[in-house]
Amino acid sequence: MKRCCIAVVLCLTSAFSLVSCTTAPGSKPQGRQDALESPPHAQEVVSEVSSRPAPAAPVLALLGAVRPEVTLLQSMLTDVKSQEIEGIEFISGRIGAEPVVLAWTGVGKVNAAMTTTLLLEHFHPTRVIFTGIAGGIDPNLEPGDIVIAKQTAYHDMGTLWSQGIEYGGVKSRMTGEPNPVFFPADPVLLGAAEEAAKSMTFGPVGLRTGQRPPKVVVGTVVTGDVFVASKEKSAELAKDLGASAVEMEGAAVAQLCCQRGVGCLVIRSISDKADRSAVMDKQLFYTMAAKNSAGLVAKIVGEGLKRGTE
Ligand code: ADE
């Protein structure tokens, strides 16, 4: 019965989330009233956090959690300029003709949020792509396969009942608007990623039964402050949130972007299957997975995005 209620709450919050965060980059998100918090008071609503002028050239931001996740992209940069802000290095340059700014956030939601805040404040990117590795929740995914996130959600945000988590977002401190449970991907970036994936070539994925080219799927990526190495938790994430993959930063970046009306896309390649072998598998497949995900991002930047920056 409780599970049923949770499912209903999820359906409703999911529907609301599409309303809340599908605003065009640059516009203010609309929202719903949240179950966890009281209504916003007028005096709480702040119109703008920053009065800093935006830089002249529109810039695309590329983030990963740790350096190896953005190494491939960093190696492609020309006209490189490095800047340290609050101890975090931001590397600007171009990939082809596209002006980009690149950084690694550190692992976990708080690190991701902090770097994203600095990024949005100082570089005013038009859009943000997060690339990296993830644990596979969908049993059909193997290390090296890629999930393009059509949406991201926290798997550790809401009310924890004995029967399970009732997922719910908290309000934006800036606008008072409730955040959705699911942060939808920027449609331009999502389209560009799907397009780029069609003509992408990767190294083969190793299976027990042989080898095959990596799969690229569009799915839900969930985020939390734990490394998941549990078959039971994975099954719960699949059932309750429809997750294809789990990681530790994506929804935090998406929340910041959503609150500021900046388009965001999370792309992850599978390094492990979020089960009892996950810690070992991650070590084995980390480099290959990081490269596959960043490879797709490079392809998007190189060609797919041209449509989206007009
Ligand atoms: N990143 C890569 N694998 C992961 C896992 N199993 N859980 C959380 N984050 C991950």
Image: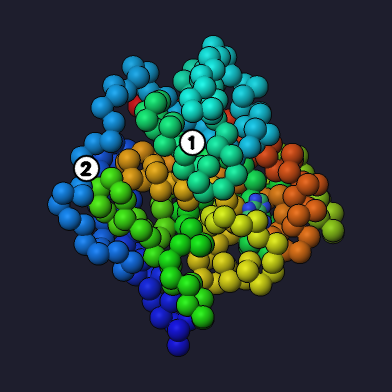
Instruction: Judge left or right: residue 57 versus residue 111.
Output: left
Distance from Cα at disc 1 to Cα at disc 2: 22 Å
Evaluate whether residue 174 shows in this view: yes
| Quadrant in which the C terminus is drawn | top left
Q: Residue at x 43, y 66 (%)?
A: 158
Q: Residue furthest toward the top?
A: 79
Q: Residue at x 62, y 21 (%)?
A: 76
- Badge 1 marks a residue whose secondary structure is helix
Q: Residue furthest toward the left?
A: 42
Can you give x and y, in whole percent of width and height, for residue 119 in the image?
44, 31
Evaluate whether residue 201 shows in this view: no
Which circle's residue, 1 or 2, is located before the other in the chain? 2
**Which residue position holds label 1?**
115
> Answer yes or no: do the residues labelled 1 and 2 have beta carbons within 8 Å?
no
Colouring chosen for the image of the structure: rainbow
| Quadrant in which the N terminus is drawn | bottom left
- Badge 2 marks a residue whose secondary structure is loop
Can you give x and y, in whole percent of width and height, for residue 239 in the image?
55, 72
Instruction: Judge left or right: residue 310 versus residue 213.
Output: left
Task: Examine the image and state in which quarter residue 69 appears.
Answer: top right
**Amino acid type, mark 2:** Val
Q: Residue at x 50, y 46 (%)?
A: 110
Can you give x and y, in whole percent of width and height, for residue 179 in the image?
34, 55
Task: Examine the image and state in which quarter residue 116 appears.
Answer: top left
Q: How many marks?
A: 2
**Which residue position holds label 2?**
46
Figure check: 278 above or below 205:
below
**Amino acid type, mark 1:** Thr
